[in-house]
Image (spheres, rainbow, N blue to C red):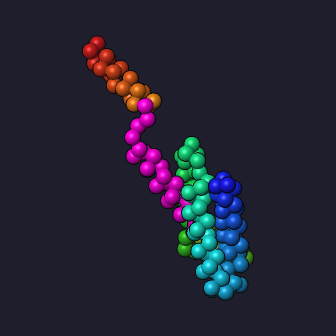
Amino acid sequence: MEDKLGRYAYILGVLIAVVLGIFSLYISDTAVLVLTSFIVIFGLLVGLLNVAEGQIKDFLLYSVVLIIAAGMGSVGTTLVSVSGVGILLDGVFSYLLMFLVPATAVVSLKAVLNLAKPASKGRKVAAKKRVTKKKRRRKK
């Protein structure tokens, strides 16, 4: 169930971000505020439910790339100066950032917590073998 909820949160978050980015000029301020809140909540849900432990590094890499691209695309007058679609793209990138940043923050915190966990027995054995190999090399 969590898997489906995370998947739906991702799809809805991206869809709402794109729709808001395109139509935010034509929607009331109250509706934009409510939909923006949903974008942030969906981002948090994606970070909590949608990323498995083995996918953390990939998710963080891809998310950071998207955040940088979206951030650079919506900075200042870069896209706004493009006639016709510039304002729309600027809005889409801004709302995508509102979705991606909370998801990335949650997954980053999960990764830090995983690093802080005590080492498993397998990792302890591997670390011990590395230490003994270094000691053997020093003796030679």
Q: Compared to 110, does 102 lie above or below?
A: below
Q: Compared to 76, does 51 lie above or below?
A: above
Q: What residue appears at the point 61 percent right and 70 percent down from the top-left corner?
A: 39
User: Foreground residue, 48 or 36?
Assistant: 48
Q: Is residue 132 visible?
A: yes
| Residue placed furthest toward the left | 139
Instruction: Reply yes or no: does residue 116 show up in magenta.
Output: yes
Q: What residue appears at the point 67 percent right and 55 percent down from the top-left corner?
A: 1
Residue 8, x across and y down, in percent = 69, 61
Q: Compared to 97, does 2 lie above or below?
A: above
Res 73 quadrant in image: bottom right
Residue 84, x across and y down, in percent = 73, 76
| Residue placed furthest toward the front | 1
Q: What residue appears at the point 41 percent right and 37 percent down from the top-left corner?
A: 119
Q: What residue appears at the point 56 percent right and 57 percent down from the top-left corner?
A: 48
Residue 3, x across and y down, in percent = 66, 53
User: Foreground residue, 82 or 114?
Assistant: 114
Q: Compared to 36, does 42 lie above or below?
A: above
Res 4 quadrant in image: bottom right
User: Foreground residue, 74 or 138?
Assistant: 138
Q: Where the C terminus falls, by quadrant?
A: top left
Q: Main secondary structure of the magenta part?
A: helix
Residue 38, x across and y down, in percent = 62, 72
Res 124 quadrant in image: top left
User: Foreground residue, 102 or 48?
Assistant: 48
| Residue placed furthest toward the top | 140
Task: Point out the stretch of residues depicted in magenta.
Answer: 97-121
Instruction: Reply yes or no: does residue 108 show up in magenta.
Output: yes
Q: Is residue 66 visible?
A: no
